[in-house]
Amino acid sequence: MAGNSFGIIFKITTYGESHGKGIGAVIDGCPSGIALSSQDFESEMGRRRPGQGGFDTPRKEEDAVEIQSGVFEGLTTGAPISLFIPSRDARSKSYEMLKSIFRPGHADYTYFKKYGHFDFHGAGRYSARETAARVAAGVVAEKVLGPVGMRVTACTIELGGISVESVDMNLVNSSKLYCPDPKAELLMEEALKKARADGDSLGGVVEVKVMGCPAGLGEPVFDRLDADLAKAVMSIGAVKGVEIGAGFEAARLKGSENNDPITPRGFKTNRAGGILGGISNGDEIIIRAAVKPIPSIGIEQETIDREGNPATIKMAGRFDVCAIPRVIPVIEAMVKLTLVDHWMRACVSKNNFIAETQRK
Amino acid sequence: MAGNSFGIIFKITTYGESHGKGIGAVIDGCPSGIALSSQDFESEMGRRRPGQGGFDTPRKEEDAVEIQSGVFEGLTTGAPISLFIPSRDARSKSYEMLKSIFRPGHADYTYFKKYGHFDFHGAGRYSARETAARVAAGVVAEKVLGPVGMRVTACTIELGGISVESVDMNLVNSSKLYCPDPKAELLMEEALKKARADGDSLGGVVEVKVMGCPAGLGEPVFDRLDADLAKAVMSIGAVKGVEIGAGFEAARLKGSENNDPITPRGFKTNRAGGILGGISNGDEIIIRAAVKPIPSIGIEQETIDREGNPATIKMAGRFDVCAIPRVIPVIEAMVKLTLVDHWMRACVSKNNFIAETQRK
Amino acid sequence: MAGNSFGIIFKITTYGESHGKGIGAVIDGCPSGIALSSQDFESEMGRRRPGQGGFDTPRKEEDAVEIQSGVFEGLTTGAPISLFIPSRDARSKSYEMLKSIFRPGHADYTYFKKYGHFDFHGAGRYSARETAARVAAGVVAEKVLGPVGMRVTACTIELGGISVESVDMNLVNSSKLYCPDPKAELLMEEALKKARADGDSLGGVVEVKVMGCPAGLGEPVFDRLDADLAKAVMSIGAVKGVEIGAGFEAARLKGSENNDPITPRGFKTNRAGGILGGISNGDEIIIRAAVKPIPSIGIEQETIDREGNPATIKMAGRFDVCAIPRVIPVIEAMVKLTLVDHWMRACVSKNNFIAETQRK
Amino acid sequence: MAGNSFGIIFKITTYGESHGKGIGAVIDGCPSGIALSSQDFESEMGRRRPGQGGFDTPRKEEDAVEIQSGVFEGLTTGAPISLFIPSRDARSKSYEMLKSIFRPGHADYTYFKKYGHFDFHGAGRYSARETAARVAAGVVAEKVLGPVGMRVTACTIELGGISVESVDMNLVNSSKLYCPDPKAELLMEEALKKARADGDSLGGVVEVKVMGCPAGLGEPVFDRLDADLAKAVMSIGAVKGVEIGAGFEAARLKGSENNDPITPRGFKTNRAGGILGGISNGDEIIIRAAVKPIPSIGIEQETIDREGNPATIKMAGRFDVCAIPRVIPVIEAMVKLTLVDHWMRACVSKNNFIAETQRK
């Protein structure tokens, strides 16, 4: 039942399958008067594209975003913005062999159980390709967040069991792995090479920082900012865990250690990760996501076919070794989409609807 | 902006503040024909009530649930079910002193920033008392889940830094701390006593297991079962992290280790935690929640008042030392509410709407 | 499936049955800082109450509204506002005889078909008593609309086939029938007396005028202001038709007659009824609702029982002869609830979310 | 704020402007396993296309519907179905002259007030072209309704003040004006010719009949079937009034006349129009819509420009004289979309979720 929309005021609906005609997102609720062109999408779509970092599938996707509606003479109009990303490279033949076998760790089995079929052409709706629509929508979200002063940056703090020991956010953008610690990055690259040689894959932990978020975002008791961020990030296929601020570490602290003292100049520490009682407190928001290793591996695995008979599978071809770094712009996009919706919702909550009359 | 509803088909809306007239939940979308009486709520409400376990606030709340609508001659009618829990013990005086000081770790500061006020009478809407309405609604959810065969059980696997070393689920219900390991429980009790003596508080980790969940629950790409579970659990004030299955540990595994092999008799392992691609796979669902230490402590803390002047605060009176065990029925309730909504949504997705005609 | 909520930003959820413990409305999304007390409801609840106008059921209902949450020290807090109206007069015995017979024109038959039961105690959820919750919620809506300058007034322009020939809105409030034409009112009263003597009932047409609505309310293409007003008014049990501006008469006009010429001082005519393309144009909004005759009559009617056997029914006791005037405050409330939600949505659409930063 | 979606379970979101790249609809929540191809859309899209009936704009639009997602090997998959209708004929030049003048009866003025701009290229989002996306979505709705046995048929019962005197539904499909009375049709055609010669336009009344709708559709108290049908039909630009069954005529009947007697073989009359208490009663559903005359006329009209200066406008070129017959498939589509959503919602309400387990 209808589960492909996200957001209340800034609402996106996505569609499309890998190896279909294309994928897209319709954004309903974007404010009018914002400059938007196809070029705005290039850099983010490039970051998500395979082949970045030298560790990923060399399949070529151009991922050009076509604006089909909602923009007139270069400005958003307030009408729905339809973003379409045509598929350039729809070779479905190579997947034919997977027609009847459930790949371990993939959603083949559950889609088959739920919908009575599974789309063997590169995973269909549950392919990572679906996330391109999220990244495109995130670019539009950024257009609202940027001028407000919010900045969302994610980096890799752990990969293949290797953790960063220092964090220099200035290094993130020049790092192929979005890693803020050059020493750790070298070890991560080693680990990736080894995994590739073994036909295996790796996971990691991504940390997102939101700077410039004003206090007041979040709509308790259910649509808390942390709750909606958790949903947003967990809705990405590769993510198996989410934490805010001190997160699981907070479970090991005492109250006297975990509480952030408040001073006239702000919070002394930030174990809360910028969110108290489900509402942003004006401090940096900190989210961490656990990214599982990619399930497609070149090692033989035990499985069953559609009829339930035992089978084995060993993926041929070249697959990504790690969802990081490609998942990073997707995580950022989901965080941005959550923030823009909550920013607009918070404006409603703060709005003096009576004074509004005078502004007309 | 309106954030006090949860669920799409089985939709709850909660209201009420601590020290107000009472709190309540309205359930819209409960199937008709289900037996329901006030007595059905007693046991769960009792589990949530302070004073359980001997470690908690001795404040007496009876927490009797009144069914105000939606039940006729003992059966649900399909109309909205209004559950009301009157407050018995609304002594607001003892909080008067907190009128102008923000308590560290609490939502005083963010509510003040968002709504322009804060309710100093025991935290108002963001008091833990609000969760009683969730527990009451969870009892109704259980009425649907039970006959389907789903069973939700939570236990304490870590408290104050002490982890369980063995898990015997049969011990959970007889344990004051819902702890499946009696040795660990003794150490946890020691830690609680010490924290109490120090005026400090502790956190922990709760693990939820869902048995009997059929394959097919979850509505990708956004309303995935894991995403909605993450939101549900993270919407509880004390929770700062959520993971599914191997969770953050999955980030350290290789694909060959993390993938669950499939056999004709089911999955060989369960690192996925019962969810693949956002859809339940028929295996046990495993969720873990990081519970932070309670922010109210009897140790002096640095803070500010409403005008931004430096201040210190030291909570007097008797407070809970740890949100566990009282948060356990709340976590279970949120998991149940997510499951019942997704169960009904999955029935829609699986429904043969055409064949439905014949059944009329 | 969950259909008891109305509105997106200013969202109400109602519950309760006639002859149950009471009925209520939970408002989620009301701005904070608005003065609200139980006394605010008295006048509107009085207008809806039976016994008004001398033509209605003499059953005594006090309809006192209890504010259970969301108000602190006399001001709304931004948290959900729970309004509860306890039932004082729950005599269900007199309805016992209706246990197994479907009353023509009532929803007994369809509720039985849908939910597998029908509540013979005075119609249960589909009793007109349910509308008291709407009127109560409308009072809170008014608290937002009033200061903005919006004023909603309904009057009776037709009753029992008698139409008004002149309209003096100043007479409406002093008229028992909310009739703006004293001559017509006399004839209407005659018609009501005759219908009462015959044991029969009458219908009529209500016209609603909204003054002071600024241009810009309405969210095309589906959530147009006229579309949502039509839904709001048609959601009242007695209403069988809705029109805006010239309405059905517009179908008989030529374009050159129906178009409202625009001048620097505004629209020259108002056949559009204040709404163009689904968006308010700043002119007076005009809505008309067709109110059917009350189905409960003291004349024998043909029907069937639960088992499908032929039966006859003749309602005993004293029933209202006409839903007018009691339905008038209900129609006004639904219009207000639609306007307040669209007013807040329009503020979102107009909002300069970027400039918002500076206002914080 | 986000108002371009319709439906809860079978949810559509539309986008696109006239003279843009195209328009589209994304359907989220369509059951899987339904045969669907591009050809399925041809006949309905043809009915909506200009040039039908010989009375309309001769502008050529091919309106071919491309299925971009959600269908695999000819069957729906349960994933969102994206329908795209590329624009073939985007000549915007001829509209350049309208850049700064508000056309009376159109939404130029209100869009400008709401969004701060208006799209002079053929009305942009509020062009009738937008309705093509609704018709396309309605074709998919029909795929669910057809096998259930529901049949939606609309006809013209009044045009330019000429009413039908007899109704033979067999004649509707062979009539250019969907008129069930050949004598009236001749007079209507005369009226259309005269209006065209005068440069004027006409309105009319459309009646929709739904046959085969089972009892039980509708979700009180707000999401009643009649309320949602009213919203659906009123959300079409040309519609200014909606009534169900006897509609406004019911306001003139007595209860003894308006109540439909019930017999073991069904309802004796159908003044209720097939809906009681907001729920379908199994009888034919009857809806009537008032269609206003098209505002674009070749007669000089008084108006203002963007700066508020007086101006006159006289539309050149060839415009439709009457929205009928082109609006007929749009009204049918909106009725179908309402019915399919309510059919699925009613299945939820009727569902024995517990017995569902056995069916898995």
Image: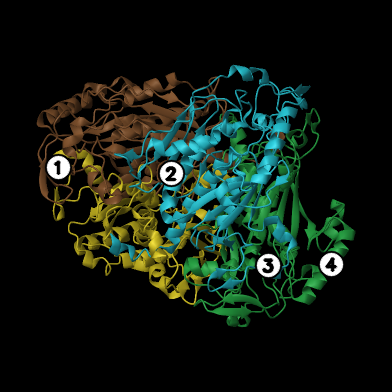
Chain colours: A green, B cyan, C brown, D yellow
Q: Tell me residue A263's x, y (percent).
A: 80, 29
Does residue B24 appear left or right of residue D289 in this picture? right
Q: Secondary structure at mark 2?
A: helix
Q: Amino acid at mark 1?
A: Glu
Residue sitting at 62 percent across and 23 percent down? B120
| Mark 4 or mark 1, whichever is nearer to me | 4
The chain holding disc 3 is A
Q: Which mark is residue D257?
A: 1
Residue sitting at 10 percent across and 45 percent down? C311
Does residue C50 appear left or right of residue B346 in this picture? left
Same-chain check, marks 4 and 2? no
Q: Tell me residue B127's x, y (percent).
A: 59, 31
| Badge 2: residue crowd in 10 Å (few <14, some 14–19, many ≥20) | many
Q: Secondary structure at mark 3?
A: loop
Q: Amino acid at mark 2?
A: Val
Q: Tell me residue A246's x, y (percent).
A: 74, 44
| Badge 3: residue crowd in 10 Å (few <14, some 14–19, many ≥20) | some
Residue ID for mark 4 = A189
